[in-house]
Image (tube, helix red, strand yellow):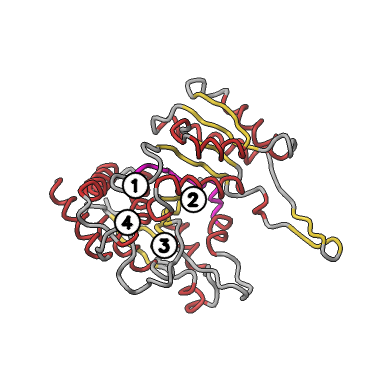
Amino acid sequence: MSYTVTLIEGDGIGPEVTRAACRILNAAGAPVEWESVPAGLAGIAAYGKPLPDVVLDSLLRNRVGLKGPLTTPKGTGYSSPNVGLRKGLDLFVGLRPVLSMPGVKTKYENVDLVVLRENTQGLYVGIEHEVTPGTIVTLKVASAEAGARIARWGFEYARNHGRRRITVCHKRRVMPLSDGAFVDAFYDVAKDYPFIQIDQMPVDDVAMELARDPSQFDVLLLENLYGDIISDLCAGLVGGLGVVPGANIGDKCAVFEAVHGTAPDIAGLGAANPLAVLMSGVLMMEHMGEHAVARRVGGAIQKVLSEGKVRTRDLGGTATTDQFSDAIIRSVEEGE
């Protein structure tokens, strides 16, 4: 059976890393045909806006997509296409698995946790206004329904991925109503999952404990702003945004993406590391039920990094994007 997957190549190094990821996934036997659509700068050039309707139409039709990093031109009045995707498709789950990678040295070892971010509410709804000159009011939106929805998704994720504990993060003492609604919804849903351990922790304590010993956490569940910050902090524990995957998932659609920037300074030089978008592609294969493909590519990544012979510049090597991709493809073929 073959699937059509929406491909958003992205800006800057986006086309280079997404094409590399597609090549590797296809070499591993992914039964995928890619439907490329323009967004970001390419969307502006083709349709006059960074998130053209053709992108949303394609994703709604195919139900799954792979995305490179996108640019939002500053000072032009354009809204972020990344935010637009989450809002337009109701991608309420921000999924960020964080795992220590062989050969990628950091101050921490054996990090293995998952950050789940509620994508649709909190301060990121973007409701703000100037009440008097120089005084700005920004509204934080929280509902029990949204809290329960992300909580249930998190418990199902934990149950199906061998995760045993979920920590809900908050600032309830400061915002008893909004953060309180998020935490209360979590505990209400938890009653249906007595086999999953649960606890709660203020988000500032979470940040401190992550710096002290990240191995104590399993799954972190956070509202929008906290999740944005903590997910990047956790990426830093294992080497940065270039070595972690990401996904935004809803009930009808899922977009798997590189969470790093567009790196325009190295765009076109063939020096970019495709790991982040490739690992997001592995997540996509798992989401689609193509577990054998996911295992082949995941195993090849682990082998190439463990050997340490072929690495891109950001990992301390000299390999080009194509050379690194070729090494992973060889490892896939050797493992078959």
Distance Cα–Cα, label 1 vs label 2? 28 Å
- Which residue is disc 4 drawn over? 315
Q: Is mark 4 on a helix, strand or loop?
A: helix
Give the percent coordinates (x, y) of residue 195: 47, 21
- Which residue is disc 2 drawn over? 248
Q: Which residue is drawn at 44% across and 70% down?
A: 38
- Which residue is disc 3 drawn over? 68
Q: Nearer the viewer, mark 2 or mark 3?
A: 3
Q: Are marks 1 and 2 in contact (CB under 8 Å)?
A: no
Distance Cα–Cα, label 2 vs label 3? 13 Å
Count residues near mark 4 (Cα–Cα under 10 Å), then give few for <14, some for 14-19, many for 20+: some
When asked about the image quadrant of residue 48, the answer is: bottom right
Count residues near mark 1 (Cα–Cα under 10 Å), then give few for <14, some for 14-19, many for 20+: few
Region of the chain picked out in magenta, as a range: 89-100
Distance Cα–Cα, label 2 vs label 4? 26 Å
Q: What element carries label 2?
A: strand
